[in-house]
Image (cartoon, rainbow, N blue to C red):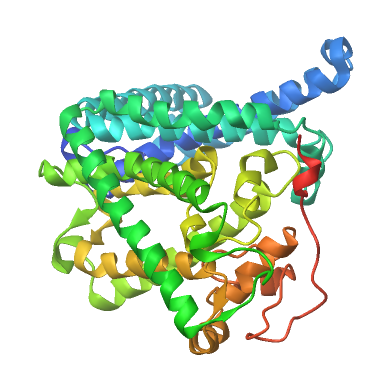
Amino acid sequence: YNIVKPILVPEHAAEATHDHAFVEGFSLLAALTHGALFAVGMVVRLARTEGLRSIAPEGAVLRFTVGIVTNFAMAVLVIGGFCLAINAPSENATAGVGLQFMAQSVADFASKQLTFAVAILPQNRSHALACVLAGAVVGASVVAAGFLVEPSTVALEDIPAKLGSMRPFTLKQADALFYITPLACTAVGVAHPHDPSMFFDSLVRCFVILELTIMSGSFLMVVAGKTFGTRIQDMDKPHDFRSPWLLKEAAETSVALYIFACFAAWPLSLYRLGLPCALVDTLEETGDGVWFYAFKTAFGLLGADWYMYMKHRILHSRNFFAFHRSHHMFRDPTPFAGFAVHPVEAVVTFGPVLFAIFPWVGLCIPLHAPVLVFLAVLNLYLHCGYTIGLVEGILAPMFVNTSAFHNAHHFKTRTHFGEILWLWDWILCTGDHPYGWKERSPTRVLGATIASVK
């Protein structure tokens, strides 16, 4: 404890907000609660499985609790021995001295950790709110993980089977959340710790800019597809500006863009108020060199795409397809359907935007904006219903998603899940690309169908 104390418990916690001590302190607090939350989920799982038998002398809950206490006792003994060995002088190296030192160290540790958290939260209310929201989500997910794991195993391959036993969300529930979610995302802005009016001003400005940009971009993408591309959708059905789904596509895209604006308003309002956040004007302000920033951006995109791929796979499961079904009602989509997703899916998709409130993320606006523009244009191209040979030939060999690949997803529904890249489909054998690398093995068909959700 004395060895690591200078790192984990900074002397001036209130002033350590924007350095690594902020991250380390809260990471340690999270680590201390992680095991307890997981254990709660395990206990609930065992109690649900065995009922009243679980609290009997030979019941699973009692056995599990005894195991936890035993492990904790062993950890205490190890820590006590470590404290005794490195701190007690040889002539006074008694068990009592070691235990006394250990008790004092634990009390001192707990006190300083709580002081650290209390000192930081009032000074940085935006961080406090983000930590509370993120902590609630992470805590719930850890409890859920403990609930889903069988008492006899923690194998990851067992988790899909446990998810499969859950009761799926219904279309009625999805329809209710379609209206509740945007209202909730808006109402949270009242709790802005610095200036709620700036939050709502940023929300409106961001939404208007997004709406004008995406709608005009969708129009131009239709024109580009008709001019330079080859139609790959059902030729017998009206398409482009004659599509009967056009207005519904545009309306649902607008709702999703509004959800994005609700999340983006948090870092944008901090930036406009001159408060610390990830958004900066120059590369120097990020503290990164050119090569490190390029690596950070590339690695971040790769991680984000893995997250999007897994999110897409989960939304195609029987339990959650009710939130993704509306997007697949557009079997022959136009660019106006590029962002036409259910508000709950929009929350899951755009929620990571909140990371931009943390200064240590470091996003240079002039360098990052072109990346966001490219991703937006790519998404419009994925839904345009045309293939442009030059674009397909350049992007597909680099594992970047294209219209040909994503159109197969809308046509087949249960394959081709990639959103930015089709790399994960190639690795996991869930989709092949006519312009890309040869498939590694036959494509696996996964997930629910439109007709299976009620």
Decide which of 135, 425 is in the foreground and name it: 425
Q: Residue at point 47% right, 65% down?
A: 379
Q: Along the horizontal axis of the image, is 398 left or right of 404?
A: left
> Which quadrant would the N terminus be assigned to in this image?
top left
Q: Along the horizontal axis of the image, is 19 left or right of 54?
A: left
Image coordinates of residue 425 in percent, x first then y, are: 67, 69
- Residue 390 appears in the rendering: yes
Q: Give the quarter of the image for residue 8.
A: top left
Q: Give the quarter of the image for residue 166.
A: top right
Decide which of 47, 393 is in the foreground and name it: 393
Decide which of 288, 227 is in the foreground and name it: 227
Q: Along the horizontal axis of the image, is 244 left or right of 29?
A: right
Image coordinates of residue 274 in percent, x first then y, are: 10, 44
Where is 283 relative to 50, above or below? below
Residue furthest to the left in view is: 274
Image coordinates of residue 117 in percent, x first then y, are: 30, 28
Q: Along the horizontal axis of the image, is 138 left or right of 415?
A: left
Q: Residue at point 29% right, 29% down?
A: 189
Where is 97 relative to 414, above or below? above
Q: How many marks?
A: 0
- Residue 72 appears in the rendering: no
Image coordinates of residue 439 in percent, x first then y, are: 74, 81
Where is 309 relative to 134, above or below? below
